[in-house]
Amino acid sequence: NPTPPTILVRDQHNQVVPFSRSQHYMCLESCGLSSEDAALATSQVYEQLLEEGEAEIPSSKIGHLTYRCLKKLFGNKTAHRYLVWIHYTHSGRPLILLIGGTTGCGKSTIATEVAHRLGIVRTQSTDMLREVMRMLVPEQLLPVLHTSSFSAWRKLPPQVNSSEEDLVADGYRSQAELLALPCEAVIQRALRERVSLILEGIHVHPALLNRIGDP
């Protein structure tokens, strides 16, 4: 079979690169398409480009062709999701993802998969931040820090007329509050350096957003 002609793409910075089906496919996966759907859409876009026979095209045309293809194959919601993702990638802003949940619910697995799909190289576990703090602060000073999140309540002052659930929750909140400062520092550094980040761990909870503020 003859080798298909190279299609050159000129981006918004006036740089010219060959059209890459693998990069286009990965972009569609980042929008939430399955591997099969992304492969189908990329194949159809590439075939359309070959039929038109242009040696060089602007990147905006790739975007228009992809949008129309996704709308035809999968509907308006998928096509709109593609536009949102493209707008984000052109914005230059870092993507900060916070993944929280209890032990064993799959936080690390999800973080690894999402990092692979979105090309995020910086991930951070709150458990590792806790280990660093334990090395820096002796147990005698912060005993709540040197125990499990679920038994941290045992290191708090005794509380009268509190249920076991309330005690466990108070212990968790006490330890999570201690971890909020290093979590905030990690996020703020990622924002300053404009590097995407996934922060995952049991200490990630909605109240952490209040400490971050607007980027």
Image (tube, rainbow, N blue to C red):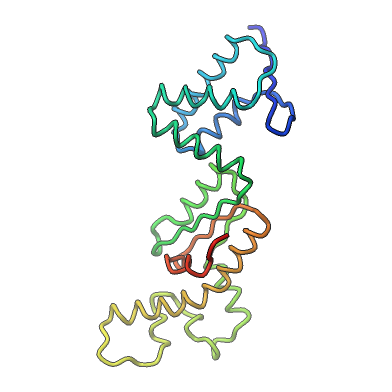
Seen as rendered, the residue at the extreme top is 1
Locate residue 173 relative to residue 143 in the image: left or right. left
Residue at 60% across / 65% down in the picture? Answer: 186
The percent position of residue 194, horizontal first and vertical second, equals: 65, 54
Locate residue 152 relative to residue 21 in the image: left or right. left
Q: Is residue 9 above or below residue 189?
A: above
Residue at 48% across / 63% down in the picture? Answer: 201
Q: Is residue 177 above or below residue 79?
A: below
Q: Is residue 113 above or below residue 137?
A: above
Q: Is residue 151 above or below residue 34?
A: below
Q: Quadrant of residue 207?
A: bottom left
The percent position of residue 54, horizontal first and vertical second, equals: 66, 12
* Nearest to the observer: residue 130 or residue 120: 120
Q: Quadrant of residue 8?
A: top right
The percent position of residue 113, horizontal first and vertical second, equals: 50, 46
Locate residue 171 relative to residue 214 in the image: left or right. left
Residue at 53% across / 60% down in the picture? Answer: 199
Locate residue 162 relative to residue 158 in the image: left or right. left
Task: Please tell me how many numbered marks the rendered image carries.
Answer: 0
The percent position of residue 115, horizontal first and vertical second, equals: 55, 48
Q: Quadrant of residue 90?
A: top right
Residue at 50% across / 25% down in the picture? Answer: 39
* Nearest to the observer: residue 45 or residue 157: 45
* Nearest to the observer: residue 44 or residue 115: 44
Q: Quadrant of the N terminus?
A: top right
Q: Quadrant of the C terminus?
A: bottom right
